[in-house]
Image: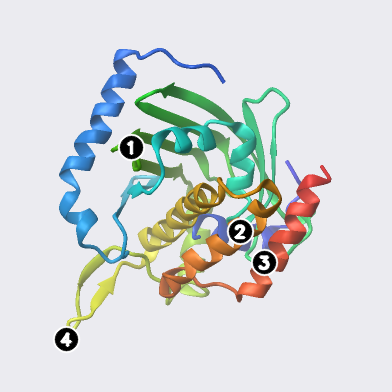
Amino acid sequence: MTPFPLAARTLGVAAWLLAGLLAAATPAVAQDAAAMRSKHAASQDKFATNQFGRPLVLESTQTSGDLRGDVYTIVDHPFATAQQALRSVENWCDILILHLNVKRCRPGANGKSIALNVGRKFDQPLEDSYELEFDWRLAAATPEYLSVQLSAEEGPLSTRNYRIQVEAVPIDARHSMIHMSYAYGYGFAARMAMQTYLSTLGRNKVGFSITGRNAEGKPIFIGGVLGLLERNTMRYYLAIDAYLNSYASPPAEQFEKRIREWYGSTERYAPQLHEMEQNDYLEMKRKEMKRQQQG
């Protein structure tokens, strides 16, 4: 693991948390694809009317020592395009680097792992970040279903059992449904770090779920740990979305389009996701990508 001073580690964790082969169509894969289609059918009303201005559903759950966020959405990309873009481990580093807390991403030589450096929401040296080792797996890739899974046993300050999964199924010739889940477990140290963050820097921050209405009829958004989880889940989903939207561009133009797309998408939800000005984000990501390309 990369050295990580305690003070920087605490704030970095708050930002971070508070933030192959064609598979055969096994019964489990068919079941997963069927579950996605069932979710699509059950979500029509939420896709049509929601706080996001697009066909998107965000769910968040907290159990004892575990947090999970789920995004379900319809994208304007054929399934074949989404599958081609998301089934390569190398492409995932181009996706993950868009998140403002990700400082560097490197695929493993075996094509089955990713080393991710995470840190604070501004430019910082790599030695002040924390490195997570993710196992990367193409769990399924059939003409009707895609599943990519990332997992890491340990993270900063007693966080553990990180799980990221992305699933996709075709809806019609031009559209796909994508499900992204982001989850992790946490212990005492992470709980204390989250409480500190939520009582200081994050005390006025909110998520996306609407918990009620005020006297003027305006929505009251969820706060606390689940609000923090929802913000981070959306940031990762919007990175996938930005990557897909730039995938057909000429290779030399893709990175610049991706970072501008990601920033613009987050600013659509500025009350939840705004952290820095556009030029600061763009310059930070250009510098981080240059460092990433240099190895």
Question: Is the Cβ of the residue at disc 2 closer than 8 Å to that at disc 4?
Answer: no
Please tell me which residue is depicted at 69% across the width and 60% down the height of the picture: 285
Amino acid type assigned to the residue bearing label 2 in the image:
Lys
Question: Is the Cβ of the residue at disc 2 closer than 8 Å to that at disc 1?
Answer: no
Q: Is residue 287 visible?
A: yes
Q: Which residue does the numbered mark 4 point to in the structure image?
A: 215
Looking at the rendered structure, the secondary structure element under dot 4 is loop
Looking at the rendered structure, the secondary structure element under dot 1 is loop
Q: Residue 173: give its label.
A: 1
Q: CA distance from mark 3 to mark 4?
A: 39 Å
Q: Taking 185 as reference, is 20 above or below it? A: above
Please tell me which residue is depicted at 34% across the width and 43% down the height of the picture: 175
* Residue 226 in picture, x, y percent from top left: 36, 58
> Which one is earlier in the sequence, the residue at label 3 or at label 4?
4
Q: Where on the picture, by quarter, is residue 125?
A: bottom right
Q: Nearer the viewer, mark 3 or mark 4?
A: 3
Q: Nearer the viewer, mark 3 or mark 2?
A: 2
Q: CA distance from mark 2 to mark 1?
A: 25 Å
**Label 3 crowd (10 A; few <14 / some 14-19 / many >=20):** some
Please tell me which residue is depicted at 56% across the width and 35% down the height of the picture: 152
